[in-house]
Image (cartoon, rainbow, N blue to C red):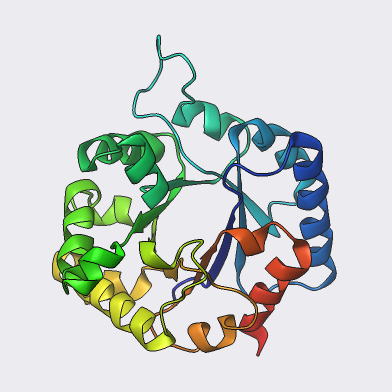
């Protein structure tokens, strides 16, 4: 049975002190009311080691928001997968649309990051999704397939066990727009079908696929009721414990 997962992506928010306080609040909330899913908190690099000290990682897993495409060396300002792992992190987000759009991360760069993350024992939340222009042109399936083909469909079935996919309709991130539950389910079902084409139905059935577009406590129950939606990659709503817990609690309803 595949994992149900709710992962928070803090993005470039929270100073160190506020981040530690939030992590502690989330940790205590999860210990007091055990979640019916895996909970992951993905923080900026500077938070990782300190947040690792706060979290009971049997209750709340820790992840980074990115890692470098090089193992080590003279790459000022970069943070390697080995460094991420050394903090106690278990996960890393790769392929987020903001990294692709703002920092020019190509399929080949992401392929390198994936390999390095796996080599260092990290689980990967790999993002894919289309822009509004691509959806309006009915190219969403083509775009998503190309993103997976270019960066992760080269992996072995064994390596694939450490991959979680996150579908993020780029037109629904931070815009207030949300894909309907039917639109989200349609895309996640398609993604599962191409995983099945590549690795077989048994592997596809074990692959957790998250929805990552303006998911909040009010729409999480409807989204999570769909058969192919295994949870959410949460942005803004992960920055307040009550909001984040409201989404996590959708698995109990």
Residue 180, given in percent of the width and then of the height, sits at 42, 84
User: In the image, is 131 to the left or to the right of 123?
Assistant: left
Residue 153, given in percent of the width and then of the height, sits at 20, 54
Indicate whether 199 appears above or below 205. above
User: In the image, is 175 to the left or to the right of 40?
Assistant: left
User: In the image, is 155 to the left or to the right of 71?
Assistant: left
- Pick the front one: 250 or 118: 250
Residue 107, given in percent of the width and then of the height, sits at 22, 43
Total marks placed: 0
Q: Which residue is drawn at 85% across and 69% down?
A: 32
Which residue is the extreme one toward the top?
74
Q: Where, by quadrant of the figure, is residue 209 drawn?
A: bottom left
Q: Which residue is drawn at 80% across and 73% down?
A: 33
Indicate whether 72 appears above or below 52. above
Q: Which residue is drawn at 65% across and 73% down?
A: 248
Q: Which corner quadrant holds the N terminus?
A: bottom left
Residue 110, given in percent of the width and then of the height, sits at 29, 40
Query: Can residue 35 be seen by looking at this rendering?
Result: yes
Q: Which corner quadrant holds the C terminus?
A: bottom right
- Pick the front one: 102 or 45: 102
Query: Can residue 96 be seen by looking at this rendering?
Result: no
């Amino acid at each position: 049975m595949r994992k149900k997962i709710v992962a928070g992506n803090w993005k470039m928010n929270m100073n160190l002190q506020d981040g530690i306080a939030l992590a502690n609040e989330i940790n205590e909330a999860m210990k007091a009311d055990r979640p019916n899913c895996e909970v992951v908190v993905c923080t900026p690099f500077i938070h990782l080691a300190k947040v690792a000290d706060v979290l009971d990682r049997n209750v709340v897993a820790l992840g980074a928001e990115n890692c470098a495409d090089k193992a080590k060396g003279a790459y000022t300002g970069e943070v390697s997968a080995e460094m991420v792992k050394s903090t106690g992190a278990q996960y890393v987000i790769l392929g987020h649309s903001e990294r692709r759009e703002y920092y020019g991360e190509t399929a080949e760069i992401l392929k390198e990051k994936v390999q390095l993350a796996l080599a260092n024992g990290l689980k990967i939340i790999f993002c894919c999704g289309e822009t509004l222009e691509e959806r309006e042109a009915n190219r969403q399936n083509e775009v998503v397939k190309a993103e997976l083909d270019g960066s992760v469909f080269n992996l072995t079935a064994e390596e694939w066990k450490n991959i979680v996919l996150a579908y993020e309709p780029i037109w629904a991130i931070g815009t207030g727009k949300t894909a309907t539950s039917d639109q989200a389910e349609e895309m996640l079902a398609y993604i599962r079908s191409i995983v099945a084409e590549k690795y077989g139905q048994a592997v596809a059935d074990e692959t957790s696929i998250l929805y990552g577009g303006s998911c909040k406590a009010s729409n999480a129950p409807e989204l999570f009721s769909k058969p192919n939606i295994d949870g959410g990659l949460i942005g803004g709503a992960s920055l307040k414990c009550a909001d984040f817990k409201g989404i996590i609690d959708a698995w109990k309803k």
